[in-house]
Image (tube, rainbow, N blue to C red):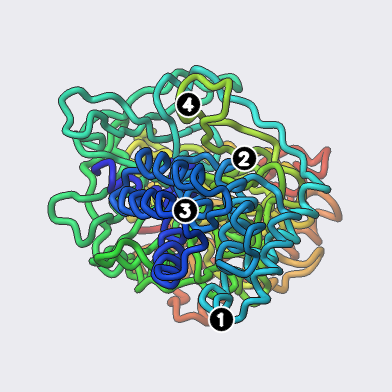
Amino acid sequence: MSYCARHRALSFFNFSLTKKLFLSLFFLFCAFSYSNAQEETLSTKNKKAIQNYYEGQKFYDGRMNSDAEQAFLKAIKEDGNFVEAHMMLGYVYSDEGKVEDAIKQIQTALELNPNFVPTGYFTLARLEILTMKYADALKNLQTFKTFPADYKRVKWLTDLDISSCIFSIDAMQHPVPFNPKNMGAAINSEFDEYEPAITADGETFLFTRRLVDPNGTEGYNEDFFVSKKSNGEWTKAYNLGRPLNTRLNEGAPTLSADGNVLIFTGCDRPGAYGSCDLYYSLKNGDSWTQARTLGPPIDTRNWETQPSLSSDGKTLYFIRGIETSDGIKGQDIYMTQLSDSGYWNTPVKLSDTINTPGKEESVFIAADNQTLYFCSDGHPGLGGLDIFVSRKLPNGRWGIPKNLGYPINTSGDETGIMVDPNGQLAYFASDRAGGLGGLDFYEFPLYDSARPQPVTYMKGKVFDAVTKKPLVASFNLIDLSNGQQIMQSTSGDDGTFMVCLPLNKNYALNVSRKGYLFYSENFSLQNVANTVVQPYLMNVPLQPIDTGASIVLKNIFFETNKFDLKPESQIELNKLVAFLNNNPTVQIEVSGHTDNVGTPQSNIILSKNRAKSVYDYLVAHSIAPQRLTYKGYGQTRPIASNDNEEGRAKNRRTEMKIIAK
């Protein structure tokens, strides 16, 4: 994308410019209405002062700020009490980034005539917010409210700024922990680095780097780079290369939990639906496929950018702005969900609990899928774009956003943050002093109350149990408490997979592929919220459908010493019904097994009754009885030691074996 397009899409990269432009637009409004209203009643009778003042106005209207400054200074030299000249000089200084000088000039104008330009109090307050003089700004805003005619024109902004000043005074008196650390030369360089994405295991860090491109029309090129973690350290970042990286610019990425799907922003591309659209690419071994637009209903003739994909891959958050001839309007957070048919639904705008009449951007959904981080200038904050966090409520709505506080937020525009999947570390880009060059990445421990719920993950490889060949297989993660599927994914071409496991739930995992027995596992993560849980590293061997092949049905549950099926067993039982319906010639034996607690005879009876409970369920769900048999083996076929509880738990199991195909 072009330089202008990049700043339309990623508007936080020139922090001072963003502020300056906003203030300039307001100053121009004030100056225009002010100069017209006062044209015949200027506060001076000095002809030379008036002549210099009008020359300064012409220069200012022509964006010739240096000449305007000199003209207004000459006017003030002729008459130091010339209110209008002080006010206009304040506007010029603000445009040039000389905020303290601007404050001094506007203060002088208001001291000379407190009632002359009511909007001057609002302008002065906004400049004081920029310099974090919140008490002074609050006083001037309250004065501005005493002028109802002018106040009504900017009522929402005035009320917001008053709330922001009150919040900021308290926030600076109660700073939050914040100790950012530069991520070092493995990731940062003399160029700008920004917009990170990370995989669920926290071991792949992908980001945008702005490179010098002498042959490019804009003199630079933005590409994706990636770094891998090895022995706890980030390796030297490398360019992802073609076909993903192109002569066009790639930015604002988000990764799927397993790192195999990349969604990003592209602007001004051939065949685009709008100025900026969302594109996707799939990992293919060590390379990536050519990027394609997500298309309608996500991409429109408007402006879509800054995507964030949930860890279950089912929800996509992004920023949409309505593009008009005057620029981007209505910049809000939208979300879309993946339908059962595999297509994205029509995006919906998040409620006004999150979105405001101001600007929202830099949305990031944490790995727990319950915690949303974003930037906004429409909620009370320290000035400009602040970072906020909102948590999903039990009713599915988003809670009232919380400002992350000072000094994470300042009076400048913050770039947003990305939080590590374990919820401990946050990452952001900054051009603060002491970096390696331009924007660098920094990391810092996120204080407790701002953290998402930690998650863990399972990763490994799916392969043919006989040939050891890697397999592409489907994954389903189901909440055992309610039977709801919370994740659906597939392993890569090399058989590798990564599945996020939010804490404080019990899960059933099923892995399946046509021509193979399905594989089941369960993860009990109840009552471990707010703790760091070690990841599950495992391989998944899939048994080809063949006589004698067997699997353990790990998600079939019974009460102790009973054979009544627990309700949560229904998920696995329905999976078994589906398998038999999809393979109508297969005949199976259902077998029950116990540990060595109790008498051998009682264990035979218990295991047989448990196997029969499964048999009865299958028959009740229209599986022909002649395809089924059941048997109880008691404690005679252990698969682990009975000398400890872990081994005994493995021995208490239900198996399914193919006896004919």
Q: Is residue 540 shown to the viewer in this render?
A: no
Residue 49 left/right relative to 143: left
Q: Nearer the viewer, mark 4 or mark 3?
A: 3
Q: Are marks 3 and 1 in contact (CB under 8 Å)?
A: no
For marks 4 and 2, the one nearer the N-term is 4
Q: State whether residue 597 is above or below residue 353.
A: above
Q: Secondary structure at mark 4?
A: strand
Q: Which mark is residue 88?
A: 3
For marks 2 and 1, the one nearer the N-term is 1
**Looking at the picture, how far across and down is residue 464, in whole percent?**
39, 40
Q: Secondary structure at mark 3?
A: helix
| On-image quarter of the C terminus | bottom left
Q: Could you tell me how far apart the alpha carbons at marks 4 and 1 are, in whole angstroms?
A: 59 Å
Under mark 3, the amino acid is Met
Under mark 4, the amino acid is Lys
| On-image quarter of the N terminus | top left
| Residue on which disc 2 sits | 426
| Residue 378, picture quadrant | bottom right
- Label 2 Cα neighbours within 10 Å, binned few <14 / some 14-19 / many ≥20: some
| Residue on which disc 4 sits | 228
For marks 3 and 1, the one nearer the N-term is 3
- Label 3 Cα neighbours within 10 Å, binned few <14 / some 14-19 / many ≥20: many
Q: Nearer the viewer, mark 2 or mark 1?
A: 1
Q: State whether residue 452 is above or below residue 229.
A: below
| Residue on which disc 1 sits | 149
